[in-house]
Image (tube, rainbow, N blue to C red):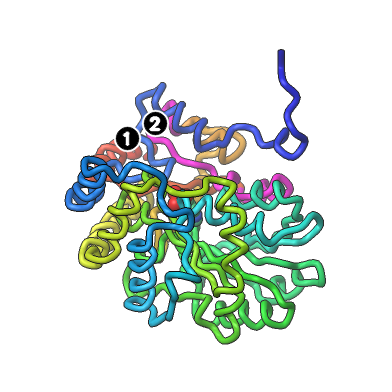
Amino acid sequence: MSPRLANRVADFGTTIFSEMTALAVRHGAINLGQGFPDFDGPESVKAVAMRAIAEGRNQYAVGVGQPDLRAAIASHARRHYGQEVDPESMVTITTGATEAIYAAIQGLIDPGDEVIVLEPFYDSYVPAVQMAGGVPRYVPLHPPGPNDTAWRLDLDELNAAFNNRTRVILINTPHNPTGKAFSADELKAIAILCVAWDVVAITDEVYEHLVYGTTRHLRLALQPGMTERTITIGSLGKSFSFTGWKIGWAIAAPALTPAVRRTHQYITFAAPIPLQAAAAAALTEGDAVVHALAVDFEQKRDYLFGVLREVGLRPVLPDAGYFILADATEFMPRGGPDGAALCRWLTTEIGVAAIPLSAFYSPEHQTETRGRIRFAFCKQQATLEQAAERLRRLKP
Ligand SMILES: Cc1ncc(COP(=O)(O)O)c(C=O)c1O
């Protein structure tokens, strides 16, 4: 029997991330596709989780999140951004940032409401909008030209996307997959439009601490008029290299918090309690660890950037995050007709897995990505060196 799937999920298919990871495993390729570190976060944080299990903290957590973790998130926001956050009425703990995004959208969107999504986008955004019956409205980020250093938001295009049906804008800063950290001017322009059109911003800030060089992460919630209309989403996974723990959170003004909590209570109800205990410890004591991780990742970014450039993959240096986008158009006749074919070829013939940029676009805009592909550098140096050795096979 092949069961009939609901219309709203029938088109979802399997993600390219799962496909490339499976292909990498089958061919013994080094997986620079999926964004997860091939090492663990701090032992001291793992020890807190293990102690919590051993000491019997194994039953349901408080639905909205354990008080100590919510307090740690409020204190973290104050320490890093000078943001005043009341842990009781403004913080909700979720099963990863992915659940926070999903819960917020389900809590805000009625069928027919429009959600502005910047393209390229993280892959869970559009399905979350569609499952709520919402309509994604795409605004492109433009690849850097010869005189730019980062992907660019055209404010006229953004302005044109707002209308009476716009309910939410989804902003991801620092941005996956481009590595763009939105500037103060861009955030100001977004804020002015949100206030003018009475729109809520959901900001996905999971890479908040992984910023390089002189780049600083800025919070949209702190722009004038945005405190009451922003849901700021974070995650333990990226800052502390525990992506498998799936501890995330949403910070929102008291009047906006029910948008997350009403849905969260029926999606997962609560996130795993021992991991919340460890997350509270990490966020309270872990600033130095996070800083050291960012310093280390900056070196890895520079190393992989150098290798990609050396072999002719034309990378763009990212300001933040886990990833480097490269332009592999030159290898297209040899490697296949598009980015997806190129990534399969790289995995099976060269032994290094990457993800096509097309995976971050709506079907109607995928062709614009041509031969751009994404490599993750959040790996041990030995892994990157092994990948470099294989990538050098690309050289003529
Ligand atoms: C932009 C972005 N948001 C959210 C997530 C997922 O976060 P979590 O694992 O906390 O659900 C990722 C993971 O790659 C991401 O890149």
Q: Position of residue 134 (x, y in %)?
A: 75, 54
Q: Looking at the image, do the residues carrying marks 2 and 1 touch, with CB atoms under 8 Å apart?
A: yes
**Tag 1 secondary structure:** helix
Q: Quadrant of the C terminus?
A: top left
Question: Does the magenta stretch mainly form a helix, a strand or a loop?
Answer: helix
Question: As rendered, which of 110 and 219 lies closer to the eye?
Answer: 110
Residue sitting farthest toward the bottom: 224
Amino acid type, mark 1? Arg
The reply to whether residue 39 is in sight is no
**Tag 2 secondary structure:** helix
Question: As rendered, which of 327 and 61 lies closer to the eye?
Answer: 61
Give the mark, 2 or 1, whose residue is nearer the N terminus. Answer: 2
Question: As rendered, which of 313 and 181 lies closer to the eye?
Answer: 181
Question: Residue 360 lies in magenta, yes or no?
Answer: yes
Mark 2, ligand 1, within 8 Å: the answer is no
Q: Position of residue 306 (x, y in %)?
A: 32, 54
Residue depicted at x 80% and y 67%: 165
Q: Which residues are magenta?
A: 346-369
Residue sitting farthest toward the top: 1
Q: Which residue is mark 1?
A: 390
Amino acid type, mark 2? Ile
Are there few (<14), some (14-19), or many (20+) residues within 10 Å of tag 2?
many
